[in-house]
């Protein structure tokens, strides 16, 4: 098969970047499974440190009894779990009848002010920092636990208060969820490897690259923890044979450009002059053209003069599309756990 040798200058660095991203993702996802399965130790350590700072509660302050209360609400979906809520219970016994109110301590801006009468401002500030870190861990553990498909004991009747009770319940739920997540990770990585192979197969068949070649690309962005991204088809809009430098446009925007070009050509014949940009846009608005999709069509293949490759292009596009539904579902599932 013919090959554009200059293209190796572009492919080589990308392949290295792709392999690095895949290795990093592989390690991260397997570490995620371990973190979900063994969430208990980290949560318990943080909780014990917090409870040690609350030895002065319940505290009596100016006729009010201040108590720290840890509670959670059951989820309407028995396989999901809610995070723990930390409340300051203020029992005012100086009035008749006595009053009692619960104030959430999740709000960082008022927490120190609420706790200072009982703990002192310095200790309250120190506790507040630790609580912020713990609540991040707790919310993450609740999200992990909700990834399972088994009922959680946190939604059972009976005890729905107590920090250590919640930790025991959420960690049992996480342990169960970890098994499901491990299965999703393995399946996602298998499908992703298949998509990589199909992408390279598609591009291999398009060698050597030329102007109006249709290529398939998976982007690797540092901000995307699950990189590479989904395969996207692109049309080469500039190609320098000497240097191998090229520019491309995704199929969806290229189809839009094709439609705009057709409208401009129709107006040119109608007006017997070059239409203005405003006239083209106005005509497009009148026609109410649908936004094109990102799929390769026979029309696009013909436009790019790739008719003899039509069967191969459409066959590989279908194989990629067949894998994408499951890949996207698993990717969204894992993304929500990070």
Image (tube, rainbow, N blue to C red):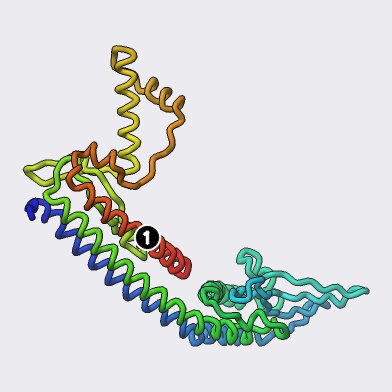
Residue occupying image coordinates x 31% and y 61% = 228
**Image position of 111 (left or right of 317):** right
213 and 315: which one is in front? 315
Frontmost residue, 222 versus 111 = 222
Question: Is residue 136 left or right of 87 when viewed as pictured?
Answer: left
Does the image show residue 122? no
Return the x and y of residue 239 as percentages of the image width and height.
15, 41
Q: Eyeballing the image, is 3 above or below 261? A: below
**Residue drawn where x is 19% and y is 44% of the image:** 213
Crowd tier of the residue under label 1, counting other residues whose Cα lies within 10 Å: few below 14, some 14–19, many 20 or above: some
Q: In the figure, residue 275 lies in which quadrant? A: top left
Q: Which residue is mark 1?
A: 324
On the question of residue 234 being in view, the answer is yes
In percent of width and height, residue 78 lies at 63, 76
Residue 318: x and y, percent? 32, 55
Q: Position of residue 50 (x, y in %)?
A: 58, 82
Q: Is residue 282 above or below residue 57?
A: above
Q: Residue furthest right?
A: 96
Q: Residue at x 61, y 87 (%)?
A: 164
Q: Quadrant of residue 114?
A: bottom right
């Amino acid at each position: 098969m013919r090959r554009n040798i200059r293209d190796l200058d572009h492919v080589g660095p990308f392949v290295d970047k792709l392999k690095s991203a895949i290795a990093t993702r592989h390690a991260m996802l397997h570490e995620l499974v371990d973190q979900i399965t063994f969430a208990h130790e980290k949560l318990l350590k943080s909780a014990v440190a917090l409870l040690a700072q609350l030895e002065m509660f319940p505290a009596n302050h100016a006729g009010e009894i201040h108590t720290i209360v840890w509670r959670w609400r059951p989820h309407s979906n028995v396989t999901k779990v809610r995070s723990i809520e930390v409340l300051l219970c203020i029992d005012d016994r100086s009035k008749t009848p006595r009053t009692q109110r619960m104030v959430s301590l999740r709000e960082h801006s008022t927490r120190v002010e609420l706790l200072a009468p009982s703990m002192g401002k310095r200790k309250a500030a120190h506790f507040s920092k630790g609580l912020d870190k713990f609540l991040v861990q707790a919310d993450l553990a609740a999200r992990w636990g909700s990834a399972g498909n088994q009922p959680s004991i946190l939604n059972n009747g009976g005890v729905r208060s107590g920090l250590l009770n919640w930790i025991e319940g959420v960690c049992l739920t996480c342990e169960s969820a970890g098994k499901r997540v491990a299965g999703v990770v393995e399946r996602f990585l298998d499908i992703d490897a298949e998509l990589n192979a199909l992408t390279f197969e598609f591009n291999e068949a398009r060698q050597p690259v030329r102007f109006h070649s249709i290529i398939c690309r998976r982007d690797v962005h540092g901000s995307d923890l699950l990189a590479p991204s989904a395969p996207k088809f692109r049309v080469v809009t500039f190609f320098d044979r000497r240097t191998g430098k090229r520019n491309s446009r995704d199929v969806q925007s290229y189809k839009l450009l094709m439609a705009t070009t057709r409208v401009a050509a129709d107006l040119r014949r109608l007006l017997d002059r070059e239409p203005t940009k405003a006239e083209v846009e106005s005509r497009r608005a009148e026609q109410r053209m649908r936004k094109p999709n990102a799929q390769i069509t026979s029309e696009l293949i013909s436009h790019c003069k790739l008719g003899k490759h039509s069967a191969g292009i459409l066959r590989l596009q279908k194989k990629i599309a067949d894998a994408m539904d499951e890949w996207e579902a698993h990717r969204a599932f894992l993304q929500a756990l990070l």
